[in-house]
Amino acid sequence: MTDDHLDDVSDLDLLRAANPVSAVEGPWRDRPLNAVAERGLNQLLHRTRTRRARRRVVLWAEAAAVALAAVLALTVPDLGAATATAAPSALHPRGGSAAVPLDRVVAQAEAAARDGEPRLRRGAHVQTWSLAMESGPGADRPVTLPEEREVRWRADGSRTERVSSDGEFVSERIFPPSRSDAPPQARPPHTPAALRAYLTEVHEPGFPRRTTPATAQEILDSLPSLLETWTLGARESAALVEILADTRGLRPEGAVTDRLGRPGQAYVLDSPGEHMRYMLILDPSTGEALGLEQTFTKDQPDFAVEAGDVMQYNAWRR
């Protein structure tokens, strides 16, 4: 059996894992991906990119020896996409630290937003740590894929996305202007009711407008898409924490230092159905979202995942 065939079998396993509806569940309908399904798709995309890079190396290595230095220089950025590290430990609030209620954060964020600064900015600077998982009885323990992405928009509506991994340049791409006027491309509103509707549409794109409000978990699931497109201003951050305070479900856990060394307050939401724990880290003085961590709360033998493994961590920077 060839290596390519083995890769294809693994990819098929990943596609099956990414299916949000199991073989015994029905009737089938469109729905958002669950946590494991989303990780499966991300891993599939990453492995496809890595496999392309590996094949390019093999082909180029067979070229004339005089071109070897140039070949290496060309392939190093692409291979940076395959960088993987040991899974980081889950963050824990400092024992004995005061837990700031969300209602108090709302009051402080509203006060900080009275002058309207900082303002909403199109573009984002995001660092992520994503768990790459295999599936099946012989699956290896997952590894973490770190990535830093900076998105800059131009006056004509086009954008540049620069990607790095562990400090090494991976790629820089220019995208033409987007014609989409739907969230998250649309400008996010700064009033709580409008922002809640916006985030609901981010969570369920293309669906008819729901009459029921988005849950706390749905809001948290929508944040990465929003904050990979926009850097929220003071008014939008205040509206976000007001939504979370009104929705309930998040409980304050105390002070925590995020993965970029910034102090914040941790707010935790358990999702028993997905065996997942969310930790949102906020700046309590402004309501700014600093990071979001998703951690498994139960072993997942099919993916060699253990309780306490960090599935995904997003850190947002100004």
Image (cartoon, rainbow, N blue to C red):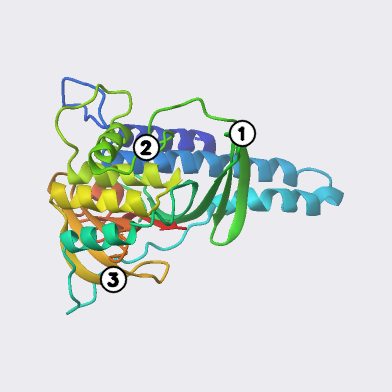
Q: Which residue is mark 3?
A: 256
Q: Residue at x 41, y 42 (%)?
A: 42
Q: Tell which tag, 1 or 2, sits nearer the viewer.
A: 1
In the depicted view, which residue is nearer to us: 266 or 24? 266
Q: Are marks 1 and 3 in contact (CB under 8 Å)?
A: no
Tag of residue 156: 1
Is there a contact, CB below 8 Å, between mark 2 and mark 3? Answer: no
Q: Amino acid at mark 2?
A: Leu
- Name the secondary structure under disc 3: strand
- The residue nearer to you, when weighing 188 against 150, is 188
Which residue type does callout 1 highlight?
A: Asp
What's the amino acid at mark 3?
A: Val
Q: Residues within 10 Å of mark 3 (few under 14, many from 20)?
A: many
The residue singled out by tag 2 in the image is: 14
User: With 29 as the anchor, is 180 left or right in this view?
Assistant: right
Question: Which residue is painted at 42% across and 33% down in the image?
Answer: 186
Q: State the residue at coordinates (34%, 51%).
A: 235
**Would residue 42 appear left or right of 270 to someone viewing this image?**
right
| Mark 2, other Cα within 10 Å: few <14 / some 14–19 / many ≥20 | many
Say whether disc 2 or disc 3 marks the residue closer to the N-terminus: 2
